[in-house]
Image (cartoon, rainbow, N blue to C red):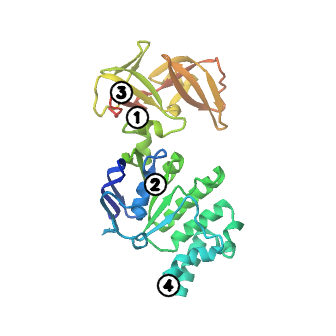
């Protein structure tokens, strides 16, 4: 595996505030990495450090084998796409795309060739003579991506590029970015707080909290085997259900009202005592399907949210809130008593004190 971007023991402090702390990250050539986390977790700060827009307090950054820790942004071999588009309003699309190349005194023939290639890839050829004010939000973001594309670099950095767009445009451009990566096969590092973007785009996701990477893995592993309660709760919508209980052997006792057998669960490091079972809403079934499950419980529906393709319902087991998804065809209403079931083997068990997976 050829390493494209290597971050070693990186720290960044603003005064006494630690924003990034002893962070390590290896990104392979051609890999699509997503930095995901809530606002203030340090993901955009990390991206700005890679880009050279922020000076680090400690550690090193390597791009394509070269130590660029103290290099200027223009010398790092990166192209960056910003959340705000950052287009020059007085220039046409063509001039916006070529501006950086012209400043670098690149020959006109090479500039024209690069602009032509980028506009073809992004399908913006009809827009080249327009100014940004004449473009839609999606078209402006395509131009912003094109401006990074013309630099012909190995590494692209995206800082929440779709967050200013409406839902449909976000979906459309997300697919375009995925196609762009499949075509170019460049290394891409992408910052977002949107877990759908992360799950659909990434080869691997780095979930961050308080300047520390909590888990770095492929989307399937992140979703099915979160390493701690934070990752488990952050990924998924509706979020994972957490059932608190006391673990003894392979049985979780929930407030003395229910015993949940965990014989199907693969423990990594089993410890008895206060524990939390995490079950995703989509892994809970209702009605006849529930009768096939290792755990079955009668419950009363409290709230119903029709979502079109499916329905989300709230109920309680042993006094603890539980959310589940059901097919849109299944009739559910508040006050209705239903049989729900799930397989704890598909869940995640966490130590209540440390919050870590066991």
Are discs 3 and 1 less than 8 Å apart at CB? no
Q: Which residue is mark 3?
A: 352
> The residue tagged with tag 1: helix, strand or loop?
helix
Q: CA distance from mark 3 to mark 4?
A: 60 Å
Q: Residues within 10 Å of mark 3 (few under 14, many from 20)?
A: some
Q: Residues within 10 Å of mark 2 (few under 14, many from 20)?
A: many
Q: CA distance from mark 3 to mark 1?
A: 9 Å
Q: Which residue is mark 2?
A: 44
The numbered mark, 4 or 2, whose residue comes first in the sequence reads 2
Residue 60 placement (x, y as % from top left): 30, 61
Residue 58 appears left or right of 125: left
The residue closer to the viewer here, 303 or 213, is 213
Look at the picture and state if 273 lies above or below 60.
Answer: above
Q: Nearer the viewer, mark 3 or mark 4?
A: 4
> The residue tagged with tag 4: helix, strand or loop?
loop
Tell me what residue is drawn at x 45 percent, y 21 percent: 295
Q: Nearer the viewer, mark 2 or mark 3?
A: 2
Q: CA distance from mark 4 to mark 2?
A: 31 Å
The residue closer to the viewer here, 259 or 316, is 316
Tell me what residue is drawn at x 53 percent, y 20 percent: 316
Residue 89 placement (x, y as % from top left): 65, 70
Q: Which residue is mark 1?
A: 229
Residue 158 placement (x, y as % from top left): 49, 60
Q: Which residue is mark 4?
A: 105
The numbered mark, 1 or 4, whose residue comes first in the sequence reads 4
């Amino acid at each position: 595996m050829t390493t494209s971007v290597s971050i070693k023991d990186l720290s960044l402090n603003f005064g006494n505030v630690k924003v990034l702390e002893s962070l390590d990250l290896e990104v392979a050539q051609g890999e699509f990495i997503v930095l995901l986390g809530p606002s203030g977790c340090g993901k955009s700060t990390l991206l700005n450090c890679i880009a050279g827009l922020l000076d680090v307090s400690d550690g090193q950054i390597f791009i394509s084998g070269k130590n660029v820790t103290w290099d200027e942004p223009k010398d790092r071999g990166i192209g960056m796409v910003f959340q705000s588009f950052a287009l020059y309003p007085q220039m046409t699309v063509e001039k916006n795309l070529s501006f950086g190349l012209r400043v670098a005194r690149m020959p006109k023939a090479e500039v024209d060739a690069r602009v032509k290639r980028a506009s073809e890839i992004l399908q913006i050829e009809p827009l080249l003579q327009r100014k940004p004010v004449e473009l839609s939000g999606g078209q402006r973001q395509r131009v912003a991506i094109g401006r990074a594309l013309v630099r012909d670099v190995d590494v692209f950095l995206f800082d929440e590029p779709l967050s200013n767009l409406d839902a449909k445009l976000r979906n459309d451009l997300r697919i375009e970015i995925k196609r762009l990566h499949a075509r170019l096969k460049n290394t891409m590092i992408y910052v977002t707080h949107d877990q759908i973007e992360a799950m659909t785009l990434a080869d691997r996701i780095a979930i961050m909290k308080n300047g520390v990477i909590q888990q770095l893995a492929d989307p399937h592993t992140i979703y099915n085997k979160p390493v701690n309660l934070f990752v488990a709760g952050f990924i998924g919508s509706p979020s994972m259900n957490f059932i608190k209980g006391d673990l003894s052997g392979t049985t979780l006792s929930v407030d003395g009202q229910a015993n949940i057998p965990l014989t199907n669960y693969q423990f990594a490091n089993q410890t008895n005592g206060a524990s939390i079972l995490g079950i995703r809403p989509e892994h809970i079934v209702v009605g006849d399907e529930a009768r096939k499950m290792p755990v079955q419980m009668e419950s009363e529906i409290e709230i119903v949210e029709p979502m079109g393709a499916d329905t989300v319902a709230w109920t309680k087991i042993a006094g603890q809130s539980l959310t589940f998804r059901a097919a849109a065809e299944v009739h559910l209403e508040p006050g209705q008593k239903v049989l729900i079931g799930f397989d704890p083997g598909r869940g995640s068990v966490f130590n209540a004190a440390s919050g870590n997976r066991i």
